[in-house]
């Protein structure tokens, strides 16, 4: 542990006179981070909801337009460590606001994109903003609230993810049908602008804490606990994004639900993800191993239920709801595990590693899921998800955080 890292740990745990010590929670600043996650995830999820008119307007296939999601994930995976290193001497408030400004520009460019390369450029810009934001958000939560309130603060920040997953797809599709797909990105830019103003008002000055360089990052990733946590992230995220993209196609084929019923079910699943996030925050205060192991186990059970022969509409609906509830609890558990318990003295490094791993898993899951669907049918992705999430739960139970960690 470096002297600077030790100094940060002493500041965080013992030094009430230090600027990073928070005897009182800065809930307004935490809420602004939640608004930031909402804007990022909402913008990330917009293309699928307007994919058909977008592809038609840009004169490309839907498959080509769908790869914009992969481009965003890859850009985020690369930008997470890059932005963290480039900006390590800057006030973190300035960095967060810069990422929000970049997100605004990304949505504006997407809204006026005249070709697929221009739209891809906008999505790469979004990926850079996403990676930069996520890589430092969890470590900043440690500086905005006292130690014992961190799970609640992370839950508030990550609630933006759940709300975006509930709102962005249906609202994006609705607005796209009425005003055109470009309007959805313009509205997203307006929401981001409001978020930027809120952050400027509520975020305090957050002087940079010296971050480990590339060698230091390698040192962190070599820690056994971090290796286990990153493996769990890779398994859960790849399992989720390999298959959940195809839930609609599955529900149209197996229980043969009508599109109105599927839309309602997806809305309910988003609400379940929101409550899963809250449940994860509650459980993180009592058992870190439980909050890291139970969500992927629930996802594995749900995936197996979807694979059962002759799955009824009710069974499928319950399985999708349970799946979303489980996945909603995953980020809170993993971030609390990595940032607070595993390497609190290198919180930003842990955030960088988790963000990059999560985005790599999204890209890999999307590519692998597409290959499975094209070559083995839509049910095959749920088989992969069941195996991946079960292995994640088993990994936590065998090698995860100990009760006294």
Image (spheres, helix red, strand yellow):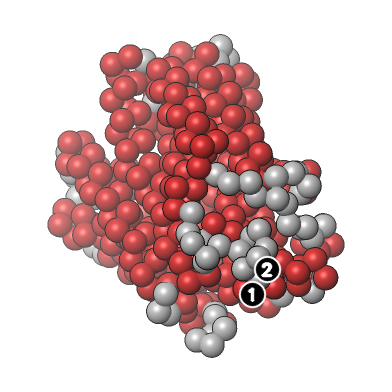
Q: Secondary structure at mark 2?
A: helix
158 with respect to 354 (left or right) = left
Q: Nearer the viewer, residue 22 or 129?
A: 22
Q: Nearer the viewer, residue 370 or 100?
A: 100
Q: Is residue 75 visible?
A: no
Instruction: Name which residue lies at 36% across and 54% down.
Output: 379
Asked whether the beta carbons under mark 1 and mark 2 sit within 8 Å of each other, the answer is: yes
At which x and y percent is residue 304? 33, 66
Q: Secondary structure at mark 1?
A: helix
Q: Which residue is mark 2?
A: 11
Instruction: Name which residue lies at 45% across and 20% down.
Output: 186
Question: How dense is the environment of label 1, judged by Cα within 10 Å: few (below 14), some, or many (20 and up)?
Answer: few
At which x and y percent is residue 362? 54, 49
What distance separates the C-alpha of mark 1 from that of mark 2? Answer: 6 Å
Quarter of the N terminus within the rendering? bottom right
Location of residue 232 (image quadrant)? bottom right
Quarter of the C terminus within the rendering? bottom right
24 with respect to 249 (left or right) = right
At which x and y percent is residue 140? 59, 55
Q: Which label was assigned to residue 274?
A: none
Instruction: Name which residue lies at 83% across and 70% down.
Output: 3
Q: Which residue is mark 1?
A: 14
Q: Is residue 247 visible?
A: yes
Image vertical order of residue 296 relative to residue 40, above or below:
below
Instruction: Name which residue lies at 34% across and 61% down.
Output: 278
Q: How many labels sit on residues?
A: 2
Question: How dense is the environment of label 2, judged by Cα within 10 Å: few (below 14), some, or many (20 and up)?
Answer: some
């Amino acid at each position: 542990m470096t002297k600077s890292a030790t100094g940060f740990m002493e500041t965080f745990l013992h030094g009430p006179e230090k600027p990073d010590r928070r005897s009182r929670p800065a809930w307004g600043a935490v809420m602004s981070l939640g608004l930031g996650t909402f804007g990022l995830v909402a913008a990330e999820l917009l293309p699928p909801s307007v994919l058909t008119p977008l592809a038609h307007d840009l004169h490309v296939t839907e498959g080509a337009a769908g790869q914009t999601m992969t481009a965003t994930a890859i850009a985020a995976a690369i930008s997470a460590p890059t932005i963290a290193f480039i900006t390590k001497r800057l006030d973190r408030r300035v960095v967060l606001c810069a990422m929000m400004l970049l997100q605004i520009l990304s949505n504006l460019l997407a809204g006026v994109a005249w070709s697929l390369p221009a739209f891809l450029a906008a999505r790469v810009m979004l990926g850079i903003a996403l990676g930069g934001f996520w890589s430092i958000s969890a470590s900043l939560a440690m500086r905005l609230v006292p130690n014992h309130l961190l799970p609640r603060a992370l839950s508030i920040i990550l609630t933006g993810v759940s709300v975006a997953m509930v709102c962005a797809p249906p609202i994006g599709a609705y607005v796209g049908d009425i005003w055109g797909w470009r309007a959805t990105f313009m509205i997203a830019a307006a929401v981001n602008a409001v978020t930027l103003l809120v952050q400027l008002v509520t975020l305090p000055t957050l002087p940079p804490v010296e971050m480990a360089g590339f060698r230091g990052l390698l040192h962190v990733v070599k820690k056994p606990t971090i290796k286990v946590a990153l493996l769990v992230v890779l398994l859960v995220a790849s399992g989720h994004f390999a298959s959940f993209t195809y839930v609609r196609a599955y529900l149209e084929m197996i229980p043969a639900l009508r599109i109105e019923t599927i839309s309602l079910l997806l809305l309910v699943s988003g609400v379940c993800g929101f409550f899963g996030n809250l449940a994860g925050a509650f459980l993180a205060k009592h058992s870190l191993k439980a909050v890291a192991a139970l969500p992927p186990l629930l996802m594995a059970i749900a995936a197996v239920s979807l694979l059962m022969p002759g799955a009824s509409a009710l069974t499928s609906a319950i399985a999708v709801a349970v799946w979303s509830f489980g996945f909603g609890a995953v980020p809170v558990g993993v971030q609390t595990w990595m940032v607070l318990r595993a390497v609190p003295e290198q919180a930003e490094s842990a955030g960088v590693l988790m963000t990059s791993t999560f985005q790599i898993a999204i890209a890999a899951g999307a590519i692998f899921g597409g290959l499975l669907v094209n070559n083995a049918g839509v049910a095959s992705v749920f088989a992969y998800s069941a195996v991946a999430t079960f292995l994640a739960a088993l990994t936590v139970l065998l090698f995860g955080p100990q009760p006294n960690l």
